[in-house]
Image (tube, helix red, strand yellow):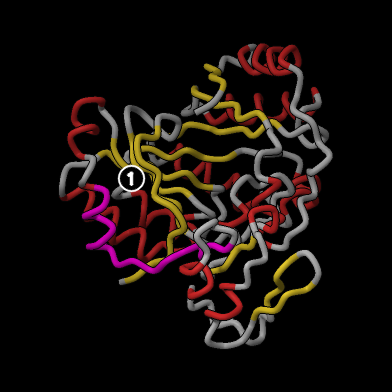
Amino acid sequence: MRGTIFNIMRFAVNDGPGIRTTVFLKGCPLSCWWCHNPEGLNPDIQVTYRAERCILCGSCIDRCPQHALQLDGTMIKRDDLRCLICGSCADECYLDARQVVGREIDAEELLAEVLKDRKFYDESGGGVTFSGGEPLLQHEFLVEVLEACKAHGLHTAIETSGLATREQLDDVRRWTDLFLFDVKLIDEERHKTFTGWSNVRILENLNHLVSCGASVVARVPLIPGVNDDDASVNDVGRTLAGLGGIRDVHLLPFHAGAAAKYQGLGMSFRMADARALPQQRIAEIEHTLRSHGLTVHRGG
């Protein structure tokens, strides 16, 4: 079985215990306004264009076998109908103004990549984490890789939005040591507004994991103007504390570092004008969540 990934990050220390290798799978059903990995939203392989790196040399135009590129003022535009995402333009560009995002890989090949760092896992109590996008969107491929990782004694973690069927969740649960579960908003209408989906199934899946005895860490992105108000923070605190099986909460403060990725993909970034929360406000949110009996960490 083959899956589509867009990055393998080695020596990750914020995606679970110890030193880890994080594998980013492509595709996500949500459309969160603040998404920091927009290259993971589309399940298809893509080509990005960073105009600020381009010197308009025209090498990519000459190289393209489909004649899908043309000079247009201060940038080189791509005809989406002609382009076959063959990667020839990216291979030609030594400044990386054009890059292919995503590649297909089979489970055996991915396992071989993960096992290269085994000595670091063994020494630090680390392992492999599957992120995205939403890794459960490729759950059949994910199950095959997870099963192979467990056969080699690796600690496995999944970072997930929780938007999946119960069957898909149970398929991966058997082979997963830790779930890093995103909890964005409790209010359903606000969740729909800022992510494009209801959170009813998400919260049901979170409750299901806890009731099954799965190890779950809640991850809360702190987004200015979205969920940083007192009511939203208390909603999260009460909900997580009420589940009984979650104590650890990771707060992930917003930053605008993904803006260039959106530009390169030709996408609009709806949080482009947002500013990071003041440290004092983050400290207040930490205090509020701790008042609900939760253990709070800033970052992964």
Circle 1 packing at 10 Å, graded few (<14), some (14-19), many (20+), is many
Picture residue at 81% right of the left edge, 26% below the top: 229
Q: Is residue 299 left or right of residue 267?
A: left
Q: x, y percentage for residue 22?
A: 39, 44
Where in the figure is residue 50, as x and y percent of width and height? 65, 57
Residue beneath disc 1 = 176
Magenta region, residue range? 98-114
Query: Is residue 216 covered in magenta?
Result: no
* Residue at screen point 30% across, 72% down: 1
Q: Nearer the viewer, residue 64 or 135?
A: 64
Query: What amino acid is found at the position of numbered circle 1 in the picture?
Result: Thr
Looking at the rendered structure, the number of numbered marks drawn on it comes to 1
Residue 44 in the figure: left or right of residue 169: right
115 and 172: which is toward the camera: 115
- Depicted 14 relative to depicted 151: above or below: above
Q: Nearer the viewer, residue 213 or 139?
A: 139
What x and y, as percent, mark residue 176? 33, 45
